[in-house]
Image: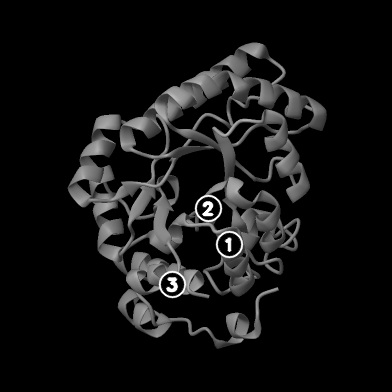
Amino acid sequence: MADAWNRRGFLKLGGGALAAAALGSTGNAATHKRALHKAVMYGTIGFEGSVMEKLRALKAAGFEGVEPMSHMDQDEVVKALDATGLKAASCCCSTHWDKPLSHPNPKVRAAGLEGLKHTLKDARRYGASSVLLVPGVVNDKVSFSDCWKRSIAEIRKAIPLAEKLGVKIAIENVWNNFITKPKQAKEFLDEIDSPQVGWHFDIGNTIYYSPPQTWIPVLGKRILKLHIKEYSKAKGSKDRGEGFKVRFFEGDNNWPAIMKALDDVGYHGWGISEQPGEQSKDADALKDLAARMDRAFAS
């Protein structure tokens, strides 16, 4: 799906500074064109070190924010945010895979709900306006229908706390065998029927099913945050997870079409990288990642 220059014209560069020069834009240049701000999901940061050291590296590379995981040491995260000036773009629930809201055991669902509530409190402390939630998982023990009903029931239980804290719940589209079509995403939100619940749209995750630019008009203003990922269908042809192991502009993302769709629905806010940790392992890698995100945002 990517256009010709995405596939053939992009130079593979060694150093971060050289990459930034060749990509031809800085964070300011990209965000002047579109009100998009660069962040990185904390759990994907390959740079080794403490929370403070990781966030300082992000700041030095030109990022404006970070997406902390839930259940981190709040004081440590706040101290690092204050010291670096980075903002919390979102807060990612760290319990939604092990304790899904769709689980057959009500005790596990209850633990998952507590995990979501903890995430909402973390987000409030960090100043994030939303939390990322995987609503459930469809498998041999959980049908699509069961996942739908159970996850909605549990999410509704968290809405009063979300309202009290002023933090929204953002559902993410992932490879959970659940919501694989934009119409399903819309219907899921319609059934919850709360302004406190929207969508955390993952650009890379949809490509296996359908182009991300076809989801954006359907979700529209309900998109609260973006996960920014590249995906190569060729690399993922035998093992679909391998498709993520490419840098921006080396896969099938049609960035001009994606950005136009976001423009059309009036999206502005955070674009949060969830690229492999290898692409943020050191200062040069982080600068290259930031420069490629700028290029994508300016497409």
Name the residue at 51% across, 26% down.
116
Q: Are marks 2 and 1 in contact (CB under 8 Å)?
A: yes
* Residue 48: % across, % down: 31, 51
Circle nearer the N terminus (3, 2): 3
Task: Indicate the secondary structure of the residue bearing disc 2.
Answer: strand
The residue mark sitting in front, 3 or 2, is 3
Circle nearer the N terminus (2, 1): 2
The residue mark sitting in front, 2 or 1, is 1
Is 127 above or below relative to 146? below
* Residue 102: % across, % down: 69, 25
Judge left or right: residue 145 versus residue 43: right
The Cα atoms of the two marked residues, 2 and 1, are separated by 10 Å
Q: Which residue is mark 1?
A: 262
Task: Name the amino acid, label 3.
Answer: Lys
Task: Name the amino acid, label 1.
Answer: Leu
Is 6 above or below relative to 133? below
Circle nearer the N terminus (3, 1): 3
Judge left or right: residue 8 versus residue 33: right
Name the residue at 31% across, 57% down.
58
Mark 1: few, some, or many residues within 10 Å (few <14, many ≥20)? some
Foreground pick, 94 / 201? 201
Q: Which residue is mark 3?
A: 33
Task: Name the amino acid, label 2.
Answer: Leu
Name the residue at 75% across, 33% down.
138
* Residue 145: % across, % down: 81, 28
Foreground pick, 271 / 220? 220
Q: Quadrant of the N terminus?
A: bottom right
Q: Which residue is mark 2?
A: 226
